[in-house]
Image (tube, rainbow, N blue to C red):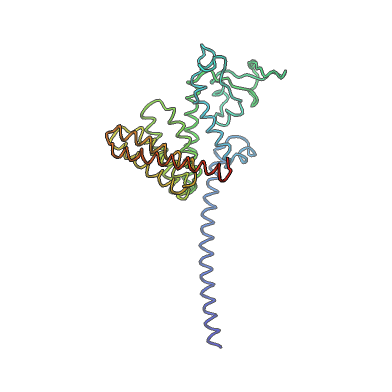
């Protein structure tokens, strides 16, 4: 009996020691994560404009960051960039002047001077007509006022300059705690918008490289997410489109391989299969045009198969599952 008690007692001590080691390891991980989070908080708090209450409410606000992306997208949109001051509108709508509320534009552009450089500041009339008037001399710009965007070039310059500041900020925050996937996706999506409207080939190459780097980080941090692999495939495509060397086709092959993996991870999503078919068809044409007919024809055939799967899945979803 004494021996049994001693054995059990030794076992309990060993178990207690193991538990203490495990608890210490868990506590250490929590402390490291907490410290990194605090560092991230301090950095973000220090870089956020406004009083203490406003700065606290804006920290970690994904909605606000997404609004900044939307402002960037609008300033670079066809509606803004095709505005013709002599015409007084856009080719598609000669009587329309692009405009946004000050409150929306301020999500990205914090300077009143920069806002006013976009065009005219106008205030809604109080008669309920929806008409506006120019701000008078000395009138303070309010969040409820509107900016009529009359200068597309200024809009483009501000979109790029403010976007760079925000992307640099996201990069710095990510370096403090380089484990999350949200900043990776947001940065890649934001850079994609800038790349679409970039003027020079050197700009497009730089943005494509940055977009690919963020997309690769996202897959590394969240490998089980099919969407991460889909976006990585898009980044490979974009990188290939700006590369005129022999390496271009290798980027396209990587795009196909990555999207194939994504489609296998989520084989029941008809939209994934549809987009997969589009990528294969696009690449099949590119390879055939490059003289690689055998490889190109294979991709075209696989693309048609993917389209057929997408159509079958869509019909099954509608006819059998009764989903719209």
Displayed quadrant of residue 144: top right
- Please determine whether, in this image, residue 113 is positioned above or below residue 323: above
Q: Is residue 54 left or right of residue 178?
A: right
Q: Is residue 318 left or right of residue 279?
A: right
Q: Is residue 13 above or below residue 49?
A: below
Q: Nearer the viewer, residue 24 or 131?
A: 131
* Residue at 36% across, 40% down: 301
Residue, far right? 127
- Report the residue that reaches farthest toward the top: 86
Which residue is pictured at 49% across the width and 32% down the height? 163
Position of the C terminus by quadrant: top right
Of 78 and 42, which appears nearest the observer? Answer: 78
Residue 92: x and y in percent read 52, 18
Please, which residue is most extreme toward the front here? Answer: 319
| Residue 156 percent location from the top left of the image | 48, 24
In the picture, the quarter occupied by the N terminus is bottom right
Residue 173, can we see it? no
């Amino acid at each position: 009996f004494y021996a049994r008690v001693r054995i059990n007692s030794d076992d309990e001590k060993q178990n207690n020691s193991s538990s203490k080691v495990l608890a210490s390891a868990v506590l250490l991980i929590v402390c490291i994560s907490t410290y990194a989070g605090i560092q991230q908080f301090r950095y973000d708090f220090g870089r956020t404009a406004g009083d203490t209450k406003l700065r606290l409410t804006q920290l970690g606000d994904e909605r606000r960051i997404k609004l900044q992306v939307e402002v960037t997208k609008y300033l670079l949109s066809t509606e803004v960039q095709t505005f013709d001051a002599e015409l007084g509108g856009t080719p598609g709508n000669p009587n329309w002047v692009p405009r946004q509320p000050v409150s929306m534009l301020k999500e990205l552009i914090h300077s009143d001077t920069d806002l006013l450089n976009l065009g005219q500041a106008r205030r809604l009339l109080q008669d309920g007509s929806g008409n506006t008037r120019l701000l008078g001399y000395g009138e303070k710009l309010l969040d409820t006022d509107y900016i009529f965007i009359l200068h597309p070039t200024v809009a483009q310059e501000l979109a790029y300059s403010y976007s760079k500041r925000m992307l640099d900020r996201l990069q710095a925050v990510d370096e403090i705690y380089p484990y999350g996937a949200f900043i990776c996706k947001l940065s890649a999506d934001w850079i994609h918008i800038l790349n679409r409207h970039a003027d020079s080939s050197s700009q497009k190459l730089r943005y494509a490289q940055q977009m690919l780097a963020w997309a690769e980080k996202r897959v590394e941090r969240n490998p089980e997410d099919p969407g991460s692999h889909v976006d990585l495939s898009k980044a490979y495509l974009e990188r290939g489109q700006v590369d005129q060397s022999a390496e271009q086709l290798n980027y396209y092959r990587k795009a196909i391989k990555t999207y194939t993996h994504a489609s296998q991870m989520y084989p029941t999503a008809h939209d994934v299969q549809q987009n997969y078919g589009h990528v294969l068809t696009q690449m099949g044409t590119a390879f055939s045009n490059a003289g690689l007919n055998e490889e190109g024809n294979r991709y075209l055939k696989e693309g048609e198969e993917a389209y057929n799967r997408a159509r079958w899945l869509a019909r099954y979803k509608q006819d059998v599952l009764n989903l719209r």
